[in-house]
């Protein structure tokens, strides 16, 4: 039996088609006023790269997550101070259209939602890194592999979707059961891929029957906890795992696929409702 579990959280997640993982490029574009004043560093590591990233955002729907390191977005928006001086200096040696493109890119990125390094935990860079990593991992929705040509599955998908709250505002468990080989796991994977964009946290726990038999439920609980929290957590026993799941998953918007459950009581081992 395959089980879907999803729970409500306090804020909705953003649906994206693709993600641009070019934080270093954004970071170098706005790293500091002193670096931006150097003519040789701006084209290669700064506004030029940023302009290309924003082109991808507009043409391909990719996501740009800016880090404003030691600079305020308003400085990019209005091109003031040494940043404006650095841009003006390039007008002497480069095509006006190129520099204009850089100016527009800096203004555009200043309006995007991101992080100001000095405002995150009083400028603690370690905390900023953790926040960015969590955000990136939550946006990386990895699709499960399914056969390319599926026949007669659309009606089944719609049937299950009709059981799901369109606003995903509650906690719900949906079971898919039947004889072996009729496509339960495939159907569950299709639904998982279809729903994944609506959830901030995802986990696919496969082969529960066999894995629990050879490695114990605790192994599967640790797998689930790592998928959601993005760091390993020791689980000494099943009850300990249930406690971690219930306490740490509270108020998170979570989609979990439990594959090959032969005993409905095993669902309790994964926290069930939290």
Image (cartoon, grey):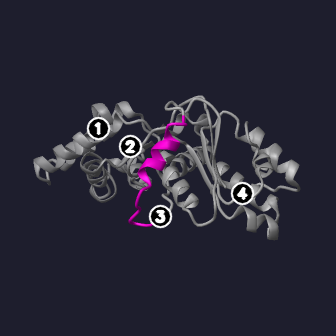
Q: Of the numbered discs in the image, which one, if any, rests on residue 108?
A: 1
User: Which numbered disc flags the more N-terminal residue, 4 or 1?
Assistant: 1
Left-right relation of 7 to 159:
right
- Report how far apart the C-alphas of labels 2 and 3 lie in the structure: 49 Å
Circle 3 sits on which residue?
Answer: 146
Q: Position of residue 91 (x, y in %)?
A: 15, 47
Circle 2 sits on which residue?
Answer: 33
Q: Which residues are magenta?
A: 146-164
What residue is rendered at 55% in x and 54% in y?
188
- Report how far apart the C-alphas of labels 4 and 3 lie in the structure: 20 Å
Left-right relation of 1 to 20:
right
Q: Nearer the viewer, mark 4 or mark 3?
A: 4
- Report how far apart the C-alphas of labels 1 and 3 lie in the structure: 39 Å
User: Which numbered disc flags the more N-terminal residue, 2 or 4?
Assistant: 2
Circle 4 sits on which residue?
Answer: 261
What residue is rendered at 26% in x and 53% in y?
52
Q: Nearer the viewer, mark 2 or mark 4?
A: 4
Q: Position of residue 105 (x, y in %)?
A: 26, 43
For label 1, the SS is helix
Q: Nearer the viewer, mark 1 or mark 3?
A: 3
Q: Out of 65 and 168, give the one closest to the viewer.
A: 168
Are discs 1 and 3 less than 8 Å apart at CB?
Answer: no
Q: Residues within 10 Å of mark 2 (few under 14, many from 20)?
A: some
Q: Residues within 10 Å of mark 4 (few under 14, many from 20)?
A: many
- Report how far apart the C-alphas of labels 2 and 4 lie in the structure: 57 Å
For label 3, the SS is loop
């Amino acid at each position: 039996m395959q089980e879907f579990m999803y729970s409500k959280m306090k804020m909705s997640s953003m649906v994206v088609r693709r993600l641009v993982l070019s934080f270093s490029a954004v970071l170098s574009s706005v790293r500091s006023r002193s670096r931006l004043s150097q003519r040789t560093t701006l084209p290669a590591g700064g506004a030029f790269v940023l302009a290309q990233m924003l082109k991808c955002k507009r043409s391909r729907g990719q996501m740009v997550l800016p880090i404003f390191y030691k600079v305020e977005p308003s400085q990019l928006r209005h091109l003031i101070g040494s940043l404006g001086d650095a841009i003006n200096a390039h007008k002497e040696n480069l095509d006006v259209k190129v520099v204009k493109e850089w100016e527009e890119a800096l203004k555009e990125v200043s309006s995007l939602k991101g992080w100001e390094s000095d405002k995150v935990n009083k400028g603690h860079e370690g905390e900023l890194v953790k926040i960015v990593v969590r955000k990136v991992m939550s946006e990386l929705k990895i699709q499960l592999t399914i056969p390319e040509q599926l026949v007669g599955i659309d009606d089944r998908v719609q049937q299950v979707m009709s059981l799901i709250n369109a606003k995903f505002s509650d906690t719900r468990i949906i079971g898919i059961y039947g004889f072996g080989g009729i496509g339960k796991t495939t159907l569950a994977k299709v639904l998982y891929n279809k729903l994944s964009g609506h959830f901030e946290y995802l986990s696919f726990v496969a082969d529960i029957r066999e894995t629990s038999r050879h490695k114990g439920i605790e192994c599967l609980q640790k797998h689930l906890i790592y998928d959601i929290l993005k760091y390993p957590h020791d689980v000494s026993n099943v009850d300990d795992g249930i406690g971690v799941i219930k306490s740490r998953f509270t108020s998170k918007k979570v989609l979990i696929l439990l594959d090959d459950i032969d005993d409905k009581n095993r669902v309790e081992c994964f926290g069930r409702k939290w």
